[in-house]
Amino acid sequence: MPIGRRLAKTVLSLLLCTFVLGCATGYIKDYTPKSSEEEAIKTDLIAFETAWNMQEEKAILALLDEDFVIWVGSGGTRRLVFTKGTFGFRLWITFVRWRYLSLGMPEIWIKGTEATAYVPMSVDGRGMRSTFRFINREGTWLILDWEF
């Protein structure tokens, strides 16, 4: 089989897999909130995904609490990567510029002024699970930390 046809078949297969997997997990925009608080958290997650993909650093920063941190790993291997104070240039280069982010259907748990959203996430087509923790400050839900 010629290289061009083989490449076309491979690309088509990858697109089909991406479509099927995306449909199977659903998208954040398809999530039906059970309360006004969940609606606000969903809105924040969609705004985060949109700002990330549009490379709008100021919009991302506006969604983050002043105590925001990013964690990578879980349990004993979990390590702090960034805080909001160090977000700026390093995070922009490391994460935002070269990576497309897609959020799936969340599981949202709310207890008082704190909430946790477990969200399937795709970064450049690689699936992973992420956790967003929120805090309600004066009626506004802000992202307190993000772990993946």
Image (cartoon, grey):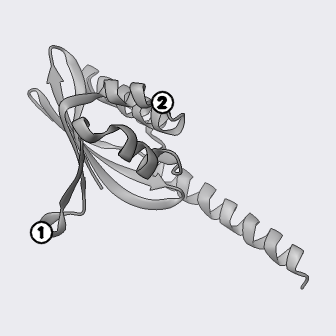
Residue sticking out furthest to the top: 138
Count of numbered circles on the image: 2
Residue closest to the eye, 72 or 81: 81
Left or right of residue 63, residue 10 in this image: right
Q: Quadrant of the C terminus?
A: bottom left
As helix, strand or loop, the secondary structure at mark 1 comes to helix
Residue sticking out furthest to the front: 89
Residue 124 screen position, x and y as percent: 53, 56
Vertical placement of residue 67 versus 13, above or below: above
Q: Which mark is residue 51?
A: none
Q: Nearer the viewer, mark 2 or mark 1?
A: 2
Left or right of residue 7, residue 89 in this image: left
Residue 39 seen anywhere in this rendered image of the structure = no
Q: Give the residue drawn at x 91%, y 82%.
A: 2
Vertical placement of residue 40 versus 109, above or below: above
Tell me which amino acid carries mark 1. Gly
Residue 36 screen position, x and y as percent: 27, 20
- Mark 1, residue position: 76
Tell me which amino acid carries mark 2. Glu
> Which quadrant of the structure image shows residue 69?
top left
Q: Give the residue drawn at x 89%, y 85%.
A: 1
Left or right of residue 54, residue 118 in this image: left
Residue closest to the eye, 88 or 73: 88
As helix, strand or loop, the secondary structure at mark 2 comes to loop
Q: Give the residue drawn at x 41%, y 25%.
A: 59
Residue 97 screen position, x and y as percent: 51, 45
Residue closest to the eye, 19 or 78: 78
Q: Give the residue drawn at x 26%, y 24%.
A: 35
Q: Which mark is residue 56?
A: 2
